[in-house]
Image (cartoon, rainbow, N blue to C red):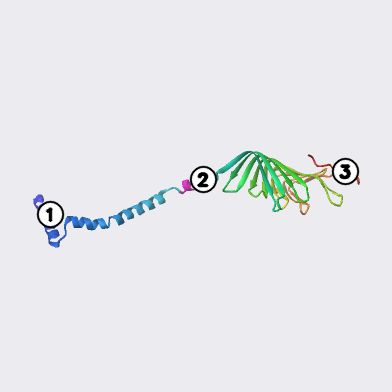
């Protein structure tokens, strides 16, 4: 009975298609016109689902790992910077240097820096590791950090005493002639010795700012006419 009903339904469907002038080939041709739209819709839905279900932490971690990568390194490196007139400002030496493009910084092992002011005063800085920007205007010294400004005679015959700053961290601003640290620093000015928990020195203003547990050891001034300590070579 069911087979008889089904056969009757199929016969009626075929009769309707024939009477309406629609063939199976024509029907498939019409449906195929909408097939690309259906496929594009399915692709868009699938893409949206993948984006929604991708963990954000993996994506951020991948970006970080790609961005902060060394783009070149040098062994027994020497980096020199010059002013606008072509005068040599600083020389930075190290056993190995690594450059990072994303931060535009140069990381140097066993760093040693020489800088000469326009007046001719020599400054020497050393540290286990240094971090410099590409312009060489800022240098962070880390581990056994030391900055020494050698004594210099002024045009009027007076002498600027030897200055030395030592600590585990020193941040040197070359263009502004400043040094600062958020860690303890020992300052030696000639024979005088000072120490503090934090440190800031402005060479242009000739002012040293020590904070925290500050200590000082002052030596009486030398008699007039006594010669200062000459710069080391």
Tell which of 212 and 87 is nearer to you. 87
Return the mark for residue 227: 3
Return the mark for residue 66: 2
Tell which of 181 and 153 is nearer to you. 153
Of marks 1 and 3, which one's residue comes earlier in the chain?
Answer: 1
On the picture, is 70 further left or further right than 3?
right
Of marks 2 and 3, which one's residue comes earlier in the chain?
Answer: 2
Residue 169 is at least partly visible in this image = no
Return the mark for residue 59: none
Residue 108, how many percent across, how many down? 64, 41
Crowd around label 3: few <14 · some 14–19 · many ≥20 (10 Å):
few
Q: Which residues are magenta?
A: 56-66
Residue 176, above or below 169: below
- Residue furthest to the front in view is 86
Residue 97, how many percent across, how many down? 62, 41
* Residue at image point 59% right, 40% down: 73
Q: Are marks 2 and 3 in contact (CB under 8 Å)?
A: no
* Residue at image point 65% right, 46% down: 132
Residue under pointer 1: 10
> CA gap, disc 1 to disc 3?
121 Å
- Residue furthest to the bottom in view is 20
- Mark 2 falls on what kind of element? helix
On the picture, is 179 further left or further right than 156?
left
Question: Is-magenta flag for residue 124?
Answer: no
Residue 92 is at least partly visible in this image = yes
Residue 75, how many percent across, how many down? 62, 37
Question: Is-magenta flag for residue 59?
Answer: yes
């Amino acid at each position: 009975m069911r087979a008889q009903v089904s056969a009757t339904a199929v016969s009626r469907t075929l009769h309707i298609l024939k009477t309406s002038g629609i063939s199976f080939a024509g029907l498939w041709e019409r449906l195929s016109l909408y097939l690309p739209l259906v496929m594009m819709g399915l692709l868009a839905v699938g893409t949206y689902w993948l984006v929604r279900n991708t963990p954000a932490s993996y994506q951020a971690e991948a970006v970080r790992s790609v961005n902060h990568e060394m783009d070149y390194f040098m062994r027994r490196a020497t980096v020199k910077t010059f002013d606008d007139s072509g005068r040599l400002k600083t020389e930075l030496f190290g056993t190995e240097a690594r450059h990072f493009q994303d931060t535009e910084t140069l990381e140097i092992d066993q760093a040693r820096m020489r800088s000469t002011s326009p007046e001719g005063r020599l400054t020497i800085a050393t540290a286990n590791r240094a971090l410099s920007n590409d312009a060489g205007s800022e240098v962070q010294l880390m581990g056994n950090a030391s900055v020494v400004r050698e004594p210099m005679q002024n045009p009027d015959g007076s002498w600027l005493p030897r200055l030395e700053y030592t600590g585990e961290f020193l941040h040197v601003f070359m263009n502004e002639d400043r040094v600062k640290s958020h860690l303890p620093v020992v300052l030696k000015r000639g024979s005088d010795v000072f120490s503090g928990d934090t440190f800031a020195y402005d060479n242009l203003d000739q002012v040293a700012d020590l904070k925290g547990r500050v200590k000082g050891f002052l030596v009486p001034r030398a008699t007039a006419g006594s010669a200062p300590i000459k710069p080391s070579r």
